[in-house]
Image (tube, coloured by chain):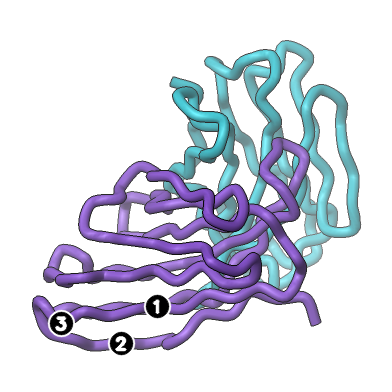
Chain colours: A cyan, B purple
Amino acid sequence: DAKTTQPNSMESNEEEPVHLPCNHSTISGTDYIHWYRQLPSQGPEYVIHGLTSNVNNRMASLAIAEDRKSSTLILHRATLRDAAVYYCILRHPDSNYQLIWGAGTKLIIKP
Amino acid sequence: EAQVTQNPRYLITVTGKKLTVTCSQNMNHEYMSWYRQDPGLGLRQIYYSMNVEVTDKGDVPEGYKVSRKEKRNFPLILESPSPNQTSLYFCASSLVWGDSYEQYFGPGTRLTVT
């Protein structure tokens, strides 16, 4: 199974960088790594995705290990509004049309 | 504003009473899907649709039906709801299906079946 492993929760101080790790040791060569987040009482929200090289957008950066068995979502300067559950997701191994969602990492931001 | 809308947002019903949760997107997306979210289980896909009149089962389709008669709408139908279908439901859409396309999610529908 191509699945991901994330810590259950992490804490960070406001206005400091946050590094959220994800292990995906069984990833296949064509699987993209997606990150979504879910703020309290809201639907999931796309954050970023990548295949092999590191990616940046206005929300975050994604650092992908050279062997692709792990990745790290980087929030450069966390704010209280970044408190959410962050999901690292891969494609379903048995289907081309599904994503596997794990339990995610609950990010707690301390003021 | 680009968005996915769901109605109702909250619903309490009784066992066996048919219900429909509507989902609509205004982005001309081809791919749409339904998820349920339960504590400790993450999001699990119920059904998905690649385009109009093309639907297929996800991981947990039992007890649900869907239809895709128009590109923008993808209703979720519970013909005979049971208490184990009490959950938080999300509809999502993306331009097409593919690894490089992001999904947009609706705000969720909290369903309670008594």
First in sequence: mark 1 or mark 2?
A: 2
Which chain is mark 3 on? B
The crowd level at tag 3 (other Cα within 10 Å; few <14, some 14-19, many 20+) is few
How far across and down, in percent of the image, does residue B40 sit? 31, 52
Is residue B35 positioned above or below A24 on the image? Answer: below
Q: Quadrant of the C terminus of chain B?
A: bottom left
Which chain is mark 1 on? B
- Tag count: 3
Q: Which mark is residue B21?
A: 1
Helix, strand or loop at disc 2?
Answer: strand
Helix, strand or loop at disc 1?
Answer: strand
Which chain is mark 2 on? B
Task: Name which residue type carries label 3.
Answer: Lys
Name the residue carrying label 2: B11
Task: Name which residue type carries label 1.
Answer: Val
**Hey, which quadrant is residue A50 in on the image?**
top right
Name the residue carrying label 3: B17
How far across and down, in percent of the image, does residue B101 sit? 75, 46
Q: Residue at x 38, y 45 (%)?
A: B57
The crowd level at tag 2 (other Cα within 10 Å; few <14, some 14-19, many 20+) is some
